[in-house]
Image: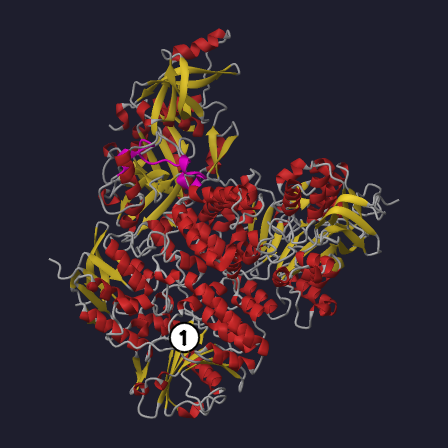
Amino acid sequence: MVPRFFTAMPIPTPFHTRTQALCTSMFWKDWAGYYAVRSFDTCHEREYYAVRHAVGLFDVSPLFKYDVRGEGAMALLSRVMTRDISKLRPGRVTYCCWCDDDGKVMDDGTVSNLGDDHYRVTAAEPTYGWLCRNARGLPVEITETTDDIGSLALQGPTSRALLSEIVADTKKPIEKLRFFRLLKATIAGHPVIISRTGYTGDLGYEVWVSREHALDVWDQIYAAGRRHGLVPAGLDALDVTRIEAGFIMNGVDYQSAHHCLIESRKCSPFELGLGWTVDLDRPGFNGQAALRRELANGSTWATVGLELDWDEYEAHFTEFGLPPHVSSSAWRTSIPLYAPRRGGRVNGRQIGYATSGAWSPLLKKNLAIATIEPKFQVPGTRIRIEVTVEHERRSVAATVRETPFFNPPRKRA
Amino acid sequence: MNAFDAIVIGAGTNGLTCAALLAQQGMAVVVVEAHEQIGGLARAHEFHPGYRSAGVLHDTTVVRPWVVDQLSLVHHGLQLRPTKPDVLALGAPGESLLLAGDRLRTAGEIAKVSERDADAFLEYRAYLDRLRPVLSQFFDRQPLDLIDTGMGDLWAMFRQGLSLRKLGKKGALELARLMPMCVGDWLDEWFETDLLKAALALPAVAGTFTGPRSPGTNANLLLHEAAAGTGGVVAGAPALVRALEKSARANGTSIRNGIEVKRLLTDGGCVEGVELVDGEELRAPLVVSSADPKTTLLELLPAGTLPRSTEEALVSWRTRGTTGIVLLALDRKPVFTCAPDKNIAYAQTGGHILDIERAFDAVKYRQVAAKPVLEIEVPTVERPNLAPEGHAVVAVRVHFVPHTHDSGWSEQQRSTLGDQVVAELGQHLENLADTIVAREVMTPADLETSYGTTGGHIHHGEHALDQLLVRPAPGCQRYTTPLEGLFLCGAGSHPGGGLTCAPGGLAATAIART
Amino acid sequence: MVAINPFNPAHPDYPGRPDKPSRSSYDAIVIGGGHNGLVAAAYLARAGRSVLVLEKRPVLGGAAVSEEVFPGFTFSVCSYVVSLFRPHIVRELELAKHGFELIPLECSFTPQPDGDALVRWADSARTRQEISRFSRKDAEIYPEFGLAMSKLSQFAKAIIDNPAPDPNAIRPREIAKLLRLGKIMQDFDGDTRHLNLKLMTSSAVDFLDQWFESEVLKSPMSVSGIIGTFLGVRSPGTAYVLLHHYMGEIDGAYRAWGFARGGTGGVSLACARSARSFGAEILTCAGVSQVNLGPDGRACGVVLENGDVINARTVVSAVDPRRTFFGLVGKQNLDDEFATQISRYKLRGSSGKVNLALDRFPDFTARPGDGPHVRGDIAIAPSIDYLERAYDQAKYGDFSERPYLNVVIPSLSDPSVAPPGKHVMSIFVQYAPYEIKEGPEFWPQRREAFGDAVIDTLSEYCPGLKDSILHRQVITPWDLEQEYGLGEGNIFHGELSVEQLLFLRPAAGWANYKTPVPGLWMCASGTHPGGGVMGAPGELAAKTLLRSGEL
């Protein structure tokens, strides 16, 4: 319930009483108007390792959720999304993005087919208005369920074992739930939807439960989690894992076309490396004509993964008599990239910018996600990236890499 | 195998004009009209056995001469009057002013009230004559695309504006001052006689969602005056329809009336024909619709076919109809109390600018004013055969009537409106109430049902500056639509509503170019 | 001993004095000590010219004035919020050094008749949450609307920060100006261009209808299109003023709207002090009765109401165009065509003010308490029909029985204007037409009835109001004319309607501050870019005059 007067921001998620008790660091952030834990401890390291070695439990309720129901639901979503939603069968989830009329990305998220003309869309930004504006004449009912549905992400190698212990009433065992599929089940006697999705690039699940049953579900997962190394985790750990997984983020690695004051800040799915989510040859959808044109004429930018050259990086620190320093948190500032000159040691002209990055404790690599001129996008290309060492601006070599940087077989298995 | 090269939807004046011109170029054209009779808003209709109206639209002085020439309408029976018909402006009971087709006579009439205004009137007419060659281009040229070609067209417009140089440097600035003004203020600058000002102002606001104190209405006045270049068609709108029909048929157009289009047939961004209500499909590479843009693009096309931004622009296309129609069948010829010896064919009420403004005020609150303003036509003066021998028909356009009544249009409300009109009219016509044989009241909601125009708007979309300059939406400004093979040719396209035949004519030219 | 209020002309630091001029001749005489006159004077003095400002009243500021109307209560008597005051004027005239201080408005509060309310906050997330109580769709579109308006405001900003472009001129400077506007237009995408066209021509309501569905949101938004004009929210041409709300954002400071510390007079006094620091002389109680013309027809000085003659190379008028030409120059000294243009110039004041001294803070039913929601402006604009009905009444020569009100309580954010615990409330009222049925001179008889209508209206939302009133000051358009010199009580020195803007303000061919009377210039709201406490006409006039080489 939103209080009538002086609605305060941020507001608590359905799991707030539990996360609040555990968040000893008091390290919160505002995620879409909700309280979200950045890290439960003062440092997120323990949470990060849990995701990669056991299981992390994230409260991802602030993710915007919309339920689209009715005969026209499929037509509406096919019109809005870059993917052909008419091909999405019940019980499946797809990741895609959506564009404005000029083929510029507004947001990215998932669409789940819950069966019986009922779909669920997740988004990083408020999307209700946009869905409504595309629904003229279509028999659909669009409801925002962000506040009504709590979502938990269980991510990590032991997540499957954990869930299989507590999930009941499923049509098939949880072990058989394949990547990007969903099933209906109960946990603690309450109906939930479980999808094999996540934002960490690891084996993982997301559990969707109505607000009134949220705490019971949390409690059961948390109790069962003890045997599986479960650690409640916050957004800082999520940020590092999503960079390792090579996932882009709205508002960080790109700006929604809806928020751009100038055209040049907008970008297309192709430029974001989301070309694979675009089904061009089908009846009209938003941005189709512009995307066709772009495919024919080429894009202005490409999104790539970068790996910074460690030796060069370390050398800069050595020069000052310092040990090499990496931040344990992911960063999200814009950093210039340059073409290499004179044997790669000197900066040429600027060719793009890195938008976020992190030190991967697992890979022991300095990683970044970057927007770059398309001719530099081939994996293996050497470029230069600015670094600041002891207040001095310098640069180091970086290599374009395929993403995901970290891609364990268990993710899809 | 297509039997036709082009299907024209709607046999109104614009549909017929477009069809005739396309057929003239050798295309096999079929016109499909939902109603049993052709003519659209210009069609005559029998509202009581033996009594027929002369159409919703009546002002034939705006018909474009080049359409008349190109379609040899005179050869097909069209007769143009040498001068505009007289209009009797009615003020308070007993007060009237004859606006004669001939300006000197009008000045003479005005002089009886105000010498100063009589002089001013001649000056005013002379000023409008100077503007006409510049402003009438608006009706005779392809529209400028202010949105997509942008500056180039803006410059073209600017250059066209420089034809204003004919008016001199000051004349151009003066025009820039006049366009955004309200018609009330401008007429105040010219005249002192309230009745004269009201009479001149009414055409600027009739059919719009504005009153004479609303800014921008002066542009409507100037455009209306610029368009009215002929004396009009003898026997009015139905005669124009007949001539257009003959011309179209002479060029080989087939006209099928009484068949309604259910939807447009599309295939991947192309329009391929129409599906009729009875299930029949007509196929042609070209479909040209004279229906209003909302009907054509939002109703007849399957949802989701249009690009979203075009769709959104059309959704906010304003079509709030404000004109009601009251048709009266009289058992004798009407006699105007203030001109008992004259055979008046056209008259209008509204003795003061503020009377018109008050009539407008009510429509904002979805109501009818206590005293609506009336445009009165007695079509039986020119065509006695519209009524039985010795009887008459009086057609009244009522301003302003809301499309959606605050408490819903009930039979009772409709009848109240009729009573109001009869009472108002009764102040100017002798023994009106006793002579009424029958009456029909049509609200904008009724016009929407009978004529299929969204909102019951007689111009297929409001005449406001933004909707005149970009008509009806970006991407559909030059009679084209985002769908290949689909064109617009109705009043919802440039240069707008009225019996100009210009949208139909200019659309045919645009289609021929593609 | 009570300290003298700094806005009292008796205060030793007051920047104007009822003295005699120190010299018999000046480079420039500025008639009228309102904020535009003072800004113009400051710029002229800064350029090394000898400048004399002549103000009729004992206090400076014109309509941008603070006065201690009742002991301890300082009112911004007329203009009550500072909007769009050009930041570069603050920098160039060093106004901050001279006491210019803005306290930002925190929000816009619109109580509803049903006891609910909408608050639009400076914090956009909070605003979105508020709006979503009425329409989730509107809440999401609101920021998008803001973004579109910010884009369009680049166009408007280019217009207000430069002298009006002259479409007829072939001077390179004018062409460059037009090209610059063209370039901005060119850089827009198709949708934005269409939007721009609609913005420039349609009514505030029609424009907002394309975006929003909730009337609770649309009504208070639409009123910004009509403030100070004799038009309704459904009158075409009112949409473009909506832009003004989004122009501050471009400067990087969204909260460009605010109270001046000590009231709006604070802005004027800062301008006056700045002008004095550059050497300008400012006289009060020095009404001008006539602009003196030399044998060659050139303005060569002024005659004061007391008969004194002061000479000057140029005369700059900060009074409205009608009064400048018909009152001070005289019709007989103008050619007929220009006289006709000026007689057609529409003033038509449409608003009044009610200023209250309050014993305590009165609760609003919708949200009791003196929380942050009342530290911005409070709008009584419950529906579009309400606003239109208010306008309709005015069209036929009455003040609105239930008017649109814009209320601010500056004492909540600036305690210097009222005794501790007490408050001042400033109520802007529209419509109050200058031409009432009985004739404008009958306003004094209607004044209290007008005041009652305002208090009754506000009491419906704020029931304790009547009991908390200590003093009330009612200002009608007649008072604005008689006391503050605003022709026909128009707060903008002339209607801000499209045919009186840009190169048509105040008359076609005379939009560049110059007048047909050689040596006479105009520098106030009756010239481009028009009214409001923005200082732009004063600045642009002074700069144009300096560039002309006449001085």
Q: Quadrant of residue A413?
A: top left
Q: Position of residue B452 (x, y in %)?
A: 31, 68
Q: Position of residue A13 (x, y in %)?
A: 46, 40
Q: Quadrant of residue A305?
A: top left
The residue closer to the viewer here, C241 or A326, is: C241
Does the segment drawn in magenta span residue C493? no
Does the segment drawn in magenta span residue A277? yes
Q: Position of residue C362 (x, y in %)?
A: 69, 55
Q: Amino acid at mark 1?
A: Gly
Residue A348 seen in render = yes
Q: Which residue is mark 1?
A: B324
Residue C6 seen in render = no
The residue closer to the viewer here, A159 or C422, is: C422
Q: Quadrant of the N terminus of chain B?
A: bottom left
Outermost left residue:
B1
**C247 versus B408 height, above or below:** above
Provide the major secondary structure of the magenta segment: loop
Q: Position of residue A40 (x, y in %)?
A: 47, 27
Residue at horizontal 46%, vertical 19%?
A: A327
Q: Which residue range is magenta in the image?
A: A255-278
The residue closer to the viewer here, C143 or B322, is: B322
